[in-house]
Amino acid sequence: MFEAENLRDWIGLPVVDPNGDKVGTLESIYFDTSTQLATFATVQAGIVGKKLLFVPLQGAVVAPKHLKVQFDKKIVKDAPSIDTDGELEASREPALFEHYGLAYSVGSTGERRLGRR
């Protein structure tokens, strides 16, 4: 395995937790608007009423057939989510960071922290 660099190449592949349990399928990448670094991924989970779960990419590693994140499946499943055709509202960003125990701050001019590309 190796450090995650161009994660777009892994869209559509499984996302697993540190124990190798499948969390879902990699759907998209959210970047920190101030650093332009990949910060969160959305993972498509569920069979009925699918939703997109957010998981931090800090410490994530890629293998030929999956992306391994550093958070347990249970923590990810309890994270804030959006509908598969939804968008993360700026007002929900602080709760997302808080769920994972990560520091949150807006940009110097008040702009939102995460942007999807």
Image (cartoon, grey):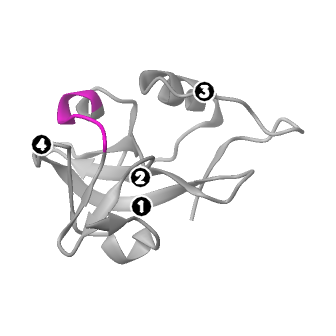
Q: Quadrant of residue 28?
A: bottom left
Look at label 3 and name its amino acid.
Ala
Residue 59, x across and y down, in percent: 40, 49
Dot label at residue 41: 2
Residue at which label 3 appears: 103
Assess whether mark 4 and mark 2 are in contact (beta carbons under 8 angstroms): no
Residue appearing at x 42%, y 73% in the figure: 8
Look at label 2 and name its amino acid.
Ala
Residue 20, x across and y down, in percent: 11, 49
Residue 25, x across and y down, in percent: 23, 58
Q: Which of marks 2 and 4 is in front?
A: 4
Closest to the observer, 50 or 33: 33
Look at label 1 and name its amino acid.
Ser
Name the N-terminal-most of marks 1 and 3. 1
Residue 72 versus residue 32 in the image, above or below: above
Dot label at residue 28: 1
Q: Give the range drawn in magenta.
A: 70-75
Seen as rendered, the residue at the extreme right is 109
Dot label at residue 19: 4
Name the N-terminal-most of marks 4 and 1. 4
Q: Is mark 3 on a helix, strand or loop?
A: loop
Q: Quadrant of residue 80?
A: top left
Look at label 4 and name its amino acid.
Asn
Residue 39 versus residue 108 in the image, above or below: below
Q: How far apart are marks 4 and 1 (CA)?
A: 22 Å
Determine if the magenta segment contains residue 1. no
